[in-house]
Amino acid sequence: MKTINVIGNFSGRNAGDAAILGGVLEDVSRQYADVHFTIPTINTGFVKRHFAEYPITPISMMPWNLSMKILGLPALRAALNADVILVTDAILFDRKLYNPLFNYLWTLSYILPRARKSGVPVVLYNCSLGPIRTDAGHAALQRILDGTSAMILRDQESVDILQRQGFHHPRVIEGADCALNAVPASQERFAQICREADLFGSDRPVIGFNVNSYVDAFVRQGGSFGREHLVALYAETVDRTITELGVDVIFIETQHMDMGIAMQVLEKIRQRDRVRLISNRTYSYREICAVLQPMQLFAGMRTHSLILSSAMGVPPVGILTYPKNRGYMRTIGLESHLVEFKDLSVESYFSRISAAFAQREHIKKEMLPQVAREKEKARRSAEVLQEYL
């Protein structure tokens, strides 16, 4: 039996990260029978509960195991004892580079080359690169690339970073986000959620929204857009969407830390009776996917809110909060459906939402083949592991 060490941010706090892990486990175990997965995590209970159908061993990265998240003995031992290491998601950026509670890049730039020297192949598996804005971050990422056997990138933005910033690697493979193949919860469970949360109770169409507590931190140039400004803008946009488009709204929050800003927005919405809130504090990513499916449109800030909505066949519009938002929306042909912070206002955001809502069936028809192509690319990435397994 081969051991696969899967490295990502699998704390249970982010539904997108959970969907990525579910996709990796499903795609790889479907193709290779005799494999076992070790998964470093600060929440072993979450991994055990949500992925019990797979052959997994969660590796605790808590302080009593001599670890500060990814920095410590558990992650190093898991890497050195594996037959292959898969690095997933978008954890290779240099914001707060030397803070191991937030950043993986610097620590992995030492762990992964050591594992590679010990004969363990390292594969960047359907991941994103960057943003990289410092010399130290550039050096750390290049150390990782120097010890990587294969690089499967999930978006063109990452390829552009390689070329634009002078990184080098001989084997770059086009992949896609593993979360695209998320499977929604059953119709029975969906009906139960609707009763619990009072969803889809009217005959009006429903538009989803997602707000992100990082605001413009990852794309900031000069001054900050401001949290209070974003809260007021979001609330006014939602009210205008409800009034002028005749819809109900469901906020879908996919990261625990976003609940604070979501509640601030909800407090300012005048037509609160037409708005509901669903979050991954209560519901799994599969259950969130089931709630997304009947929506007519989705307006999001988190990258994986856009990915999961499109994976469920719901056309997304969004705000450019991360470079990877542009990368994903470009991949499915919807880059023009993003608003940049420099252009963001109630008028610009609502105009984008209104135009997409009017053309939603056409957009969906054009989008679905692109999403199907990306889903297949994500699945086929498992074939790259053949030589290592």
Image (cartoon, rainbow, N blue to C red):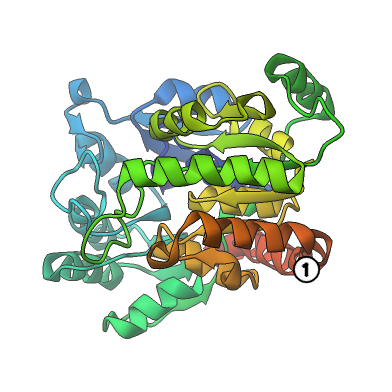
> In this picture, is 261 found above or below 46?
below
Going 43% across and 66% down the picture, which residue do you hit? 343
Going 19% across and 33% down the picture, which residue do you hit? 68
Q: Residue furthest top?
A: 196
Left or right: 117 in relation to 316: left
Residue 230 point in image, percent of width and height: 40, 46
Left or right: 204 in relation to 66: right
Residue 92 point in image, percent of width and height: 31, 58
Where disc 1 sits, the SS reads helix
> In this picture, is 160 found above or below 70?
below
Crowdedness near tag 1: few (<14), some (14–19) or many (≥20) residues, C-alpha within 10 Å: few
Q: Quadrant of residue 269?
A: top right
Visible in this render: residue 117? yes
Going 21% across and 24% down the picture, which residue do you hit? 65
Going 19% across and 25% down the picture, which residue do you hit? 63
Residue toward you, 273 or 112: 273
Left or right: 378 in relation to 64: right
Residue toward you, 259 or 5: 259
Residue 190 point in image, percent of width and height: 77, 26
Residue toward you, 382 or 84: 382
Q: Quadrant of residue 307?
A: bottom right
Q: Quadrant of residue 135?
A: bottom left
Which residue bears the numbered disc 1? 369
> In this picture, is 165 found above or below 197?
below
Visible in this render: residue 36? no
Q: What type is the residue that disc 1 sits on?
A: Pro
